[in-house]
Image (spheres, helix red, strand yellow):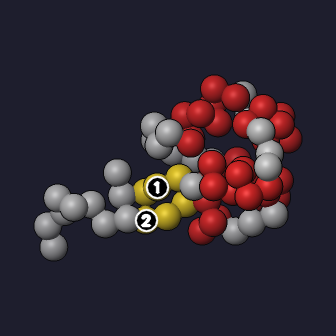
């Protein structure tokens, strides 16, 4: 998948649990797991904003584009 979600890295840096993060952002732990595991098809800007606010980071700290190995140019 070309977009890699780095929530786990930011949570580890802050020693924050998924449960605490989910509560502070306003998501269920199950939805955080969907995001962390790269199974989400979309993220609302309001959710991204809340995640950045809680983690005191930029969207680029949470999301990274990685070129797909099978992608033709």
Apparent side of residue 8 relative to residue 18 in the rendered image (left or right): left
| Mark 1 nearby-residue class (10 Å; few <14, some 14–19, many ≥20) | some
* Disc on the earlier residue, 2 or 1: 1
Residue at the image point whose x is 72% and y is 50% from the top: 11
Question: Which circle marks residue 65 in the picture?
Answer: 2
Quadrant location of residue 19?
Answer: top right
Along the viewing direction, whichever of 48 and 20 lies nearer the viewer: 20
Image coordinates for residue 9, horizontal then vertical, percent: 63, 55
Q: What kind of element bears circle 2?
A: strand
Could you tell me if residue 49 is visible in this image? no
In the picture of the structure, the residue carrying the numbered disc 1 is 4
Image coordinates for residue 50, horizontal then vertical, percent: 78, 51
Q: What kind of element bears circle 1?
A: strand
Image height of 54 relative to 59, above or below: above
Q: CA distance from mark 2 to mark 1?
A: 6 Å
Apparent side of residue 33 relative to residue 57 in the rendered image (left or right): left
Residues at badges 2 and 1 in contact (C-beta under 8 Å)?
yes
Quadrant location of residue 31?
Answer: top right
Along the viewing direction, whichever of 31 and 6 lies nearer the viewer: 6
Quadrant location of residue 18?
Answer: top right
Residue at the image point whose x is 58% and y is 47% from the top: 43
Along the viewing direction, whichever of 45 and 64 lies nearer the viewer: 64
Residue at the image point whose x is 74% and y is 66% from the top: 57
Residue at the image point whose x is 36% and y is 58% from the top: 2
Image height of 69 relative to 15, above or below: below
Quarter of the image where the C terminus is located: bottom left
Image coordinates for residue 38, horizontal then vertical, percent: 47, 43
Image coordinates for residue 51, horizontal then vertical, percent: 74, 52
The residue at the far bottom in this view is: 73
């Amino acid at each position: 998948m070309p977009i890699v979600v780095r929530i786990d890295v930011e949570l580890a840096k802050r020693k924050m649990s998924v449960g605490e993060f989910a509560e502070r952002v306003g998501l269920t732990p199950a939805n955080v797991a969907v995001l962390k595991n790269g199974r989400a098809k979309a993220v609302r800007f309001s959710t991204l904003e809340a995640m950045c606010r809680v983690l005191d980071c930029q969207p680029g700290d949470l999301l990274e584009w990685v070129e797909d190995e099978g992608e033709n140019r």
